[in-house]
Each structure stands twice: as C-alpha cells, then as structure tokens.
Amino acid sequence: MKILIIEDETDLLLTISNYLTREGNICELAKTFDDADEKISIYQYDIILLDIGLPDGNGLNLLKSIKKYNLQAGVIIISAKNSLDDKINGLDIGADDYMTKPFQLAELNSRIKALIRRRGFKGNNTLVFNEISIDTDGKEVKVNDKKIVLTKKEYDMLMYFVINKNRVLTKEALAEHLWHDNIDLADNFDFIYTHLNNIRRKIKAKGGKDYIKTIYGMGYKFTDQ
Amino acid sequence: MKFLTKINRQYLKTMGFSLILLSVLGWLILRNILNEEIKENISEKEYAVIREIKNEDNLPNIYPTVETKKIAKKKSEPQMFKKVYIKDEFENETEPYLEYTNTVEIKNQFYLIIIRHSLLENDTLFTAISLPLLLLLIISFIILFLITKKLNKTVWKDFENNLIEIEKFTIKNKQKLQLKSSGIDEFNRLNKTVKNLTNKLKKDYFTLKEFTENASHELQTPLSIILLNLEEILQQKLSEKTFKLVVSSVNAVKRLSNLNQSLILLAKIENNQYHSDNVVIINDIISEKIDEFSPFFDKKNIRIKLNLTKIFKVNADKELVRILVNNLLSNAVKHNVENGKIIININNNGFEICNTGPENSLKNENIFDRFTKENSESFGLGLSIVKQICESLKLIILYKKTNLHCFLIKKVIK
C-alpha cells in the first residue's frame, strides 16, 4: 500500500512511517500543509493519514484536495483533539476514520487494514494465517477449512491478532480495542482471558495450533515462530 | 430601602422640622410686629380722643374700644398696657384685648382714657402661620412624589435594567456585559467601572481556561510519541524485568492520557461545545449500554431489574448521554457486591440507577467534585463528568442512600 503520512511532529512521523514501512507499505511523509497539498495533487495514494492540527493550516481543508485529486485514497484523521465536531466534520467531508492521540501502532494498523478491506483493495477480503482463514465480508473463520463459530468479541480479538501478527500486544491494548474507552473496569482483563481461552479452544478443536503466546503474563503475541 | 424612598423620607423629615421651626419663629416675629402696630394704633386713637375732648369737649365712648371719663385726681402710673379678656356679646366668648390706660390733664381737668384693641388669639395666630406652611409641605411632597414616579420611569429605569444585567452576569459566558447609557454622569461612571471590571474578569478567566485547554491538547502529542516509542521497545527481545517496566510505563502513559482526555471532555461540556439539538431517548441508550455491560454483570452475578415502561427523552448530544449512562452504570458495577443487583427506573421526567453496595453511604457533599475517589484505581472524574453533563442538559442529579445507593436524574421542573 502507498501511504501518505501528514504529521508535523517529526518523532511521531518517523515512528509511524518506520512501523508502516516494516509492515510492507511504501510511506511518504509531509510535515506541512503546503507540502501535503502539493503531494496530494501530484501523486496517488491508497491511504492518507491526516493530522488535522497542522501549524500552517487546518488539515480538514486538505480533505477537499484529497477529494479532488485522490478520490480513491482512504483517509484516517489523526487528531490531538478528541473533538466530536472535528470528528463529525471530518467524516462528513469524506474521511473514513478518526483516531485520537495518543494511539498505539497496533490499533493504527488494525484501522488501516479495516479501511483497506472496506475499500476493497486487491480483493483483500480474506486474511490467511497458516491453517486459519478469515473471510472479512461474511465474518467467517475457518480452521483447516472447517468453520468455527466465534462470538463478536472473539472474532474482533482474532482479527486484531492476525492483523498485528508477530507483534507484542499488551493486555491493555487488547482491552481497549475490544471495549474502547467506554469501560474502564478493572475486570476487563478477566474477559480477555476468557475470550483468549475460548479462541484457543475453538481453534484446537478443528486441529489448529495455538499461536497466541503469552509474554511474561502481561502481553500477547500471535506468531508461528 | 430604595434610593428615592430614602431621599423622600429625608426630605419629609427636614421639611417637617423646618415647618415647626419656621412656624414658631414666624409666630414670634408676627406677634411682635402686630403688638407694635397695635400700640401705634392705640397712640393714634389716644391722640384722636384727646383732640376730641379738647376741641369738642365731648367724651367719646365706644365700648369696648374707647372709654373716657372725668376723674378727680391723677393716677399714680401715668401710662399702662395690659392684656384683658372681654366677653364678646355677639359670639358669646371672651376675646383678648390690649388695654391702654392713661390719665391726661386737659384744661385743668383729669381724664381717664382707656383704649382697647382686640388681639388675635395666640393659637389663631399660630394656625394662621403654620397652616399655609403645612399646605406648602403637602403640595411640595405631592410634587416630589410625582417627580419620583417620573424619575423611576426614566432615569432609574435604565439603572434598574443595568442592575438586572449585572445580576445575570456569569463569568463563564463569553458575552460581554451590555449596560445602557443613561445620560447621567454618575451612572455612566458606574457602568464604565463595572464594564471594565467584568471584562477584565472574563478575560482573565478565559485566558486561564484557554491555557489549561491548550496545555491539555499540547500534552497529547508528546504522550503519543512516548506511547509509540514504548510500544516499539516492547517489540524487542526484553528480559522479564524490563518488559514489565515498559508495560507499566505504557499503562501509566495511557492513564495520563485518559486523565487528560477526561479534563478536556469536562472543559468542552463546560464550554457548551456539544449541541443539544437531537432528541435522545434515554431508554434506548440504557438498553444499549446494558447490552455492552452484560458480561460485567454476569461476572459478578448481578441481577438487573429494568423498569422501562415510561419513556424519558432529552434534547442532547447522543454521545454525551452515552457517557452519562456509561459512567453511572460503570459505577453501579464497580461498587457493587457479588450477587448484587442494579435497579433502573425510568419515568417521563427522569430516571434512577440504584445498586447494592457497601453499607456506608457516600459522603454526599463532595461525591461530584473532581478528584474525589474511593481508591487509587480511578481519577475520581466519572461523577464530576456526570454532574457536568447534567448541568449542561439542565438536569438535576441527586444521590440518596436507602438500602441501595441511588443516583436520580430528573428534569428541572419550571
């Protein structure tokens, strides 16, 4: 995927681009409004990450250029403001998703992948990891071609793992992905264990391997290595 | 006491006092003048009487004013004034007279001359003076009253209006204080001072608020960088000790960021940045949230009793109502006991969420304050957000402890 990252903070810009490059994307960077505007009008991108709090202009105005020159690009707004107005405005004038700082890379990755699926790039509606395949259109999971039935939360969790494979994810990041910010209850984690064990059990039942590794009791990694 | 009433009273007091003083003084002066006049008059009469005796040899007698008679010898005191009372035949009452007695010698004959002049009664005189003054006082007071009424309608009207404006003044409102100019220097000076004062207050308040808000926003970016970097560190091969340290740092940063977001949320509700132009049906939001929370209810084996027969609607931003219900339910779960229950009642004017919990009731006075917390797990912002949302939606929130802990939210009844 070709991704344009518009962000004025160098540290943030580099961390995000390094990560997304490692994930196999081609990243281009823009630090200012004008720079971004120019790039949008010349090149074509699949995904544009847009920080709307730019020093030389409101990033929301870039959405107009994007609609003009880069219609096929999926846009994810990144904002330091958890402002509903910006969110609604942004989504109204054509952004596809909205993330509030600070976010985690795994979450960003998951949002980008979801966006790619929604936009239907390259028939990306099936995710395959060894014997596990996920049909994202029908929300169906098969292990060794045998269907397994997951609850919504279990499905979300498995998707998150597969998308962020080989990556250490903390319990908290998982909980946040599943429950969002709405539920700040400490027993969140107990549900994570329950869901994890259910996923493991259901995959094993169809002859699949357990790819979910626990790391020092505080994190997880979905990996076959 | 109203300013004009005060002035009127003062005026009445001064006028009353002056009236008494003037009356007494006037009476004294007038009496003196009258006495002098009477004495002069008597002298003229005496002269006329003497001339009459001399020229006409006639003894004029007009009772009671003039009496003359021949006497044998001269009286010891030559001239004498004295006050006498003489019965008036017509009115059948005694009237005061000034009586002048003198003995004169005309052509070797002594005559006794008595001349009397009627005097005004003291009280008559007093009345004659004070009555017009009293009348003057009454008339001037009526005029004053009319002027006051007129002033109240014109000059003081502006003042009253301005006063109402000042009473309505709130520091949180961006709007500047609008005061009417009344064309009176003192009032205009007051207006100017009040305006300057309130503008300065507002400016300081908003500067401080803006600073806090900007600080909160600006914090999010460095927090993002810390978080992303820590996450990247987590991906490396780490010892258990280092891994745990990094995870705990990640969690601390998340906590910091959540705190920050809560404060931003509070500020935004306070700034009325949410529009309450949607009709939100609380019943729907509660059902939706109960679904979301159901795993948590199951875990503590909490029974939910839902009384959704009536519908409670508010004009609000849907997201805000979600936060409101979310925080209340989350508290109801968090502070609940194993095998406890949550009862939710809704009527047309409000709803209440009650839960079983610890015996002790919460300390009523500060549960809605920021950073009031039961344990170190939370920031103690949940209920202050609830309270702030209620205020912005013109709802009242009450906490009561019966055998259950209840939070009651209802519309303000006008």
Image (cartoon, helix red, strand yellow):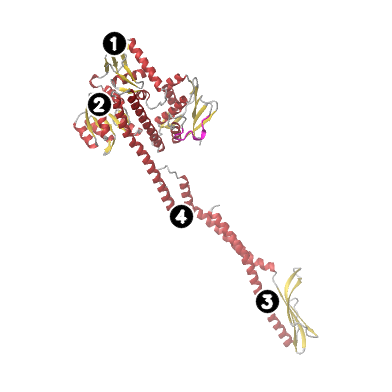
Using the rendered view, name the quadrant where residue B114 is placed. Answer: bottom right
A23 drawn magenta: no
Q: Are marks 2 and 3 in contact (CB under 8 Å)?
A: no
Q: CA distance from mark 1 to mark 2?
A: 31 Å
The amino acid pointed to by label 1 is Asp
Q: Which mark lies nearer to you, 2 or 3?
A: 2
User: Residue B185: horizontal and vertical position, in percent?
Assistant: 44, 57
Magenta segment, which residues?
Answer: B361-372
Q: Which mark is residue B187?
A: 4
Q: Nearer the viewer, mark 2 or mark 4?
A: 2
| Element type where label 4 sits in the image | helix
Q: Residues within 10 Å of mark 2 (few under 14, many from 20)?
A: many
Instruction: Residue A215: tell me if it is visible.
Output: yes
Quadrant housing residue B377 = top left
Q: Are marks 4 and 3 on the same chain?
A: yes
How many neighbours does mark 3 have within 10 angstroms: few (below 14), some (14-19), or many (20 or more)?
A: some
CA gap, disc 4 and disc 3? 59 Å
In the image shown, does B155 or B193 lie closer to the viewer? B193
Q: Amino acid at mark 2?
A: Leu
* Residue placed under numbered mark 3 in the picture: B38
The residue wearing badge 1 is A145
Tell me the SS state at disc 2: helix
Do discs 1 and 4 belong to a common subunit? Answer: no
Q: Is residue A139 left or right of residue B297?
A: left
Is A1 located above or below residue B102 in the figure?
A: above
Q: Is the residue marked by circle 1 packed among few (<14), some (14-19), or many (20+) residues within 10 Å?
A: few
Say which of A125 and B21 sits in front. A125
Foreground label between 1 and 2: 2
